[in-house]
Amino acid sequence: MWQRHQHSQCIKEALSKAEQVCIDHQCRLTPIRKKVLELIWKSHKPIKAYDLLAQLSSEDFIEKPPTVYRALEFLIENNLIHRIESQNAYIGCNHDHENLDSKFLICEQCNQVEELSEPKINKTLSEVSKKQGFTPNMVNIEVHGTCSQCAQN
Amino acid sequence: MWQRHQHSQCIKEALSKAEQVCIDHQCRLTPIRKKVLELIWKSHKPIKAYDLLAQLSSEDFIEKPPTVYRALEFLIENNLIHRIESQNAYIGCNHDHENLDSKFLICEQCNQVEELSEPKINKTLSEVSKKQGFTPNMVNIEVHGTCSQCAQN
DNA sequence: CAAATAATGTTATAGTATAACATTGCTTAA
DNA sequence: TTAAGCAATGTTATACTATAACATTATTTG
């Protein structure tokens, strides 16, 4: 994964995608929000709020928790990042989401995370839900295990 | 749900199931562990660690966080409860789990949680994972939405 | 430009969880 | 049965995660 691509490239793409999303959504990718998004992408693994905080404060940005949490909230609302619930951590999103749903493969060894697109699962979940009279609004799936890289080692 | 059943009955069942599980697993359902499990079942919704703590301290039990967190850890390891990641909360489990996997329908209105058994989803997830060379170890699915009761209101 | 709204600054505190070491209790094998 | 070893709990302190509430600054819009 990260060995195989020009990482600076995917950060650039993420940022320019974010610009476009904000135009579409009529909201503003302010310097702080942009910086937080950039740091998240730079990490390329789930990164924690207080780690972001530390990195921000080592640069010229304000370093209080609310600053970071507000930026995270904004980015999540616009589907530019996701929260990995089992880790209290945040990761960049380059998928196009029609619905509020996210699915992750999380490697317990290297901590690398891969986001899945798998409509079949959503469909099955919808069916099962409906059987129970339940109307889904948001789905989060976190699969923990071992990635192929780590399985080789 | 909770309107329709004798709740005291399901607590009893949960506790006696727990006794059996601990015999099978050769571990001990100590008074603290039992009390925590009982409180979780009494709640009948996801309950938070510090709420358990408060309830314990109002009775004759020791009221320090590690006490509760250790009991929770034990109960989770033995599949007697699950953690709802999106809520930092804990709920009783009366399913038989072969693997480490859990799936929940979480009502955003009443906060009631239903655990799902749906092997098809596990199978699909396994297939998708395998395609990526990923070996799953544990799966957690949390579906947020509206339950049938609340949809009527 | 003024008013309204959005975003950020700031202080304080709430909420969640674990580390580390001491003590007590249970088990088991000599 | 009793000492050794291990499991469980007690205890103190602290780390980590997140938000409330109000002040200030920046941007947008009539």
Image: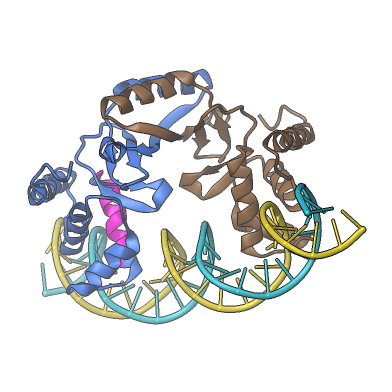
Chain colours: A blue, B brown, C cyan, D yellow
In front: B98, or A151?
Answer: A151
Q: Residue at horizontal 58%, vertical 42%?
A: B77
Location of residue A109 with respect to C1 vertically, above or below:
above
Question: Which part of the image, by quadrant, shows the C terminus of chain B?
Answer: top right
Location of residue B117 with respect to B56 vertically, above or below:
above
Task: Tell me residue B9's x, y (percent).
Answer: 79, 32
Magenta residue span = A67-79
Q: Residue at horizontal 9%, vertical 52%?
A: A8
Instruction: Indicate left or right for A99 with A135 as reference.
Output: left
Instruction: Indicate left or right for C28 with A67 as reference.
Output: right
Question: Which part of the image, by quadrant, shows the N terminus of chain B?
Answer: top right
Instruction: Indicate left or right for B124 with B98 as reference.
Output: left
Quadrant position of residue B4: top right
Q: Residue at horizontal 74%, vertical 33%?
A: B20
In front: B111, or A147?
Answer: A147
Quadrant position of residue B19: top right
Instruction: Indicate left or right for A84 with A14 as reference.
Output: right
How many numbered circles are shown? 0
Location of residue B60 with respect to A84 vertically, above or below:
below
Task: Tell me residue A144's x, y (percent).
Answer: 39, 39
Task: Tell me residue B28's x, y (percent).
Answer: 73, 45
Q: Is residue A68 magenta?
A: yes
Q: Is residue A35 magenta?
A: no
Location of residue B16 with respect to B125 vertically, above or below:
below
Task: Tell me residue C21's x, y (percent).
Answer: 60, 74
Q: Residue at horizontal 67%, vertical 36%?
A: B25
Judge whether residue B153 can be spotted in this image.
no
Most common SS among magenta residues: helix
